[in-house]
Every structure is written in C-alpha cells, then in structure tokens.
Image (spheres, rainbow, N blue to C red):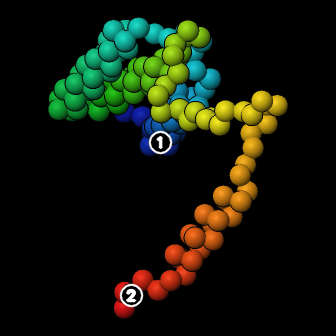
Amino acid sequence: MVISMPMSLAAVWKLAFAIALLATIFVSACARAPRHSVPGSQLRQLVLCALGLYGVGGLASLTHHELLAGLIYGAGIMVAALAAWLSRGRDQEDPPDDDEPVDVQPPPEPDGVPRLDWASFEREFREYSERVREPSGRG
C-alpha cells in the first residue's frame, strides 16, 4: 500500500523532518554535557541499536518502502545523537583527560614571585638573533 501525499505536503514534511534531525544533532553536540557519566556498556548498546536501525532502514530501502526507511534512518540518527550526548557526561571524581593543557608554573621564589634572570635572557636572545641573521649558505 503506497501513501501518496500532495507534492507540497511531502516537501514540507521532508523539510520538517530534516530540520528535526539537524536540531537533534546540533543539540547533542552543543548542549550542556550530562552531570553523570553513562557506563560504556550502555553507550555500546545505544550504538548497536543505532546500527541495527540503519540495517533495518537499509532493508526497507531495498524493498522500496522509502517512507518507512526514512523514518527508521531518522530514528537511528537520533539514537546515535543521544549516544554522542551521553558520552560527554563526566562525574566529578573522574580524573582529568591527559590531553588537557596543564598550566606549568616554575617554582616560586621564597617571596612567592618567580624571578627572571634578565642578563641570561638578553645574552641568549643576542646569540639567537645573531644565528638567525647569519646567511645559511643556501643559495
């Protein structure tokens, strides 16, 4: 049984569906991360569910059920976006990621202010600037 809609209604429906999918993806990427982390096993289950929905959508496409396939693909996209959002959650006791920049400060002097050896700095800077100015001999 094929459901036929007027062309303008079908176009409006497709546009609204596309906007809903884009909004779902945008929210999963930009919304505040959940306060608590979700166990990895549950995230894997969500991803497997999304892959299963993509597979069923593929079967629906192969059997020429385009409307059903589109809805199932959309559900798969929404489940994948949910998994992406949930994967961003972090508990307070989680250790920080290793790739986060660390502010490494030199140890402070006894009065708490680090000292800079200006004479050494100027000497090393002069040596560097002289090395840079020298022709490298490359033609």
The correct choice, above or below, for 20 with respect to 53 in the image is below
Could you say which quadrant of the image residue 35 lies in? top right
Q: Name which residue lies at 69% across and 64% down.
A: 122
The correct choice, above or below, for 7 with respect to 51 in the image is below
Image x and y of residue 17, in percent: 48, 32
Give the quadrant of the C terminus.
bottom left
Secondary element under disc 2, as helix, strand or loop, is loop
CA gap between label 2 and label 1 equals 68 Å
- Of discs 2 and 1, which sits in the foreground? 2
Name the residue type under label 1: Ala
In the image, taking residue 77 as reference, residue 29 lies left or right, namely: right
Residue 69, label in figure: none
Q: Name which residue lies at 53% across and 76% down.
A: 132
Could one spot residue 4 in this view of the protein? yes
Residue tagged by mark 1?
A: 11
Q: Nearer the viewer, residue 85 or 101?
A: 101
Determine the residue located farthest toward the bottom in the rendered image. 139
Q: Nearer the viewer, residue 92 or 126?
A: 126
Residue tagged by mark 2?
A: 137
Q: Name which residue lies at 67% across and 32% down.
A: 107
Could you say which quadrant of the image residue 54 lies in? top left
Image x and y of residue 110, in percent: 77, 30
Name the residue type under label 2: Gly
Give the quadrant of the N terminus.
top left
Q: Neighbour class for label 2 at 10 Å: few (<14), some, many (≥20)? A: few
